[in-house]
Amino acid sequence: MPLNKITILPGDGIGPEVIAQGLKVLEAIRLKYSHQWQVNEALIGATAIDQTGDPFPEASLHACQQADAILLGAIGDPKYDNNPSATVRPEQGLLRMRKSLGLFANIRPVKIYESLLHLSVFKPETLKDVDFVIYRELTGGIYFGDKIKEETWSSDLCLYHRYEIERIAHLAFKQAMSRKKKVTLVDKANVLETSRLWRSVVQELARQYPEVSVDYMFIDNAAMQVILYPARFDVVLCDNLFGDILSDEASVLSGSLGMLPSSSKGEMSSLYEPIHGSYPQAAGKDIANPMATILSVEMMLRDFGFVKEAEDIISAVDRCIEEGYLTEDLRPKIARKCSEVGARIVSIINK
Ligand code: IPM
Ligand code: MG
């Protein structure tokens, strides 16, 4: 699929700041390789509520539907987090966007940078050879099941259809074929009916991928194994809720949540975003780590076949890390601003 139109959703908190750095890098690559792609911007999250009353207005949906790729910053605002009775919330915009664009697979690679090893709370031996990717189902499960709110009780339904499991499981198996050929399904099949469905569907599909070894792990055990033996994982397949939790946990391995990019795939379009949130305490201070957004741009270019362009970004990020040219979350000797890190990466790309 060609890359012509890119829609940018800066969102809330540090979203616009990290997106600005991602765009600087995208523009540097566009000029260097004379690409023609067009970029437009749309609203999402609390910013969209403030301006239109809707966290994902019709105009934003339309812009995303027209786009080949979408780049998202972050959404979320504390004024909604502590108000359980708010009926309009920024997160609804994100969920509605995922659902209406059919973005059913969220892909979160967990990679360790050699030069950041010393920052990790983990022992270097634990982090040796850590390289895995989480395939999180994104448009089903408890996030989207019927919700009931009564005076004295509430309920969230967790519902999965076979086809919802099959389509993401195929992607996970295919990914494993080009990696270490291992898939780990993380579930709670000792308790949950939906997890037992996941197991039986994955067992069936596994026959089509005889070279891939499959293992099954309960989420509580997986939460422990990811910390104790992270190098044992290759492709980790999860439902929506377990994938959400496990991916934040896994990000700790890399030294900062600010380092991890993600992509979300569907039938119609793909979306790229850092896995971190809107970090409202840092908003407007130019201190957030832009690497996860810049690496999301890298994932986007690679997916569309721009391998040289993606390699340029990866080597610039590596170089920046080696130079210690980093934002304060990575505790460098001298902390650089978000915009300075973006500018440094652009200048390395232009060399
Ligand atoms: C994520 C976030 C979202 C989620 C929130 C903001 C609704 O935590 O993308 O991981 O739970 O999916
Ligand atoms: Mg999350």
Image: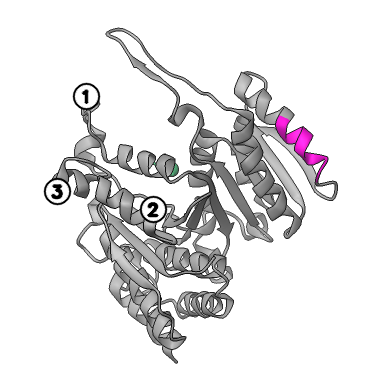
Q: Residue at x 31, y 41 (%)?
A: 93
**Which tag is nearer the camera, tag 1 or tag 2?**
2
Q: Residue at x 27, y 64 (%)?
A: 17
| Magenta residue check for 88 | no
N-term-proximal mark, 3 vs 2:
3
Which residue position is annotated with label 1? 85
**Which amino acid, by three-letter code, is at mark 3?**
Gln
Q: Which mark is residue 242?
A: none
N-term-proximal mark, 3 vs 1:
3
Residue 116: x %, y % from top left: 52, 67
Asked whether residue 2 is in view, the answer is: yes
Crowd class of label 3 (few under 14; some 14 to 19; many from 20; radius 10 Å): few
Which residue position is annotated with label 3? 51
Residue 343 lies left or right of residue 141; in this view the side is left
Q: CA distance from mark 3 to mark 1?
A: 21 Å
Label 2 lies in ligand 1 vicinity (Cβ under 8 Å) = no
State which quarter of the image contains the C terminus.
bottom left
User: In front here: 116 or 140?
Assistant: 140
Number of numbered discs visible in the structure rendering: 3
Label 1 lies in ligand 1 vicinity (Cβ under 8 Å) = no
Asked whether residue 192 is in view, the answer is: no
Which residue position is annotated with label 2? 65
Q: Secondary structure at mark 3?
A: helix
User: In front here: 171 or 13?
Assistant: 171
**Which amino acid, by three-letter code, is at mark 1?**
Ser
- View extreme (right): residue: 210
Q: Secondary structure at mark 2?
A: helix
Crowd class of label 1 (few under 14; some 14 to 19; many from 20; radius 10 Å): few
Q: CA distance from mark 3 to mark 2?
A: 21 Å
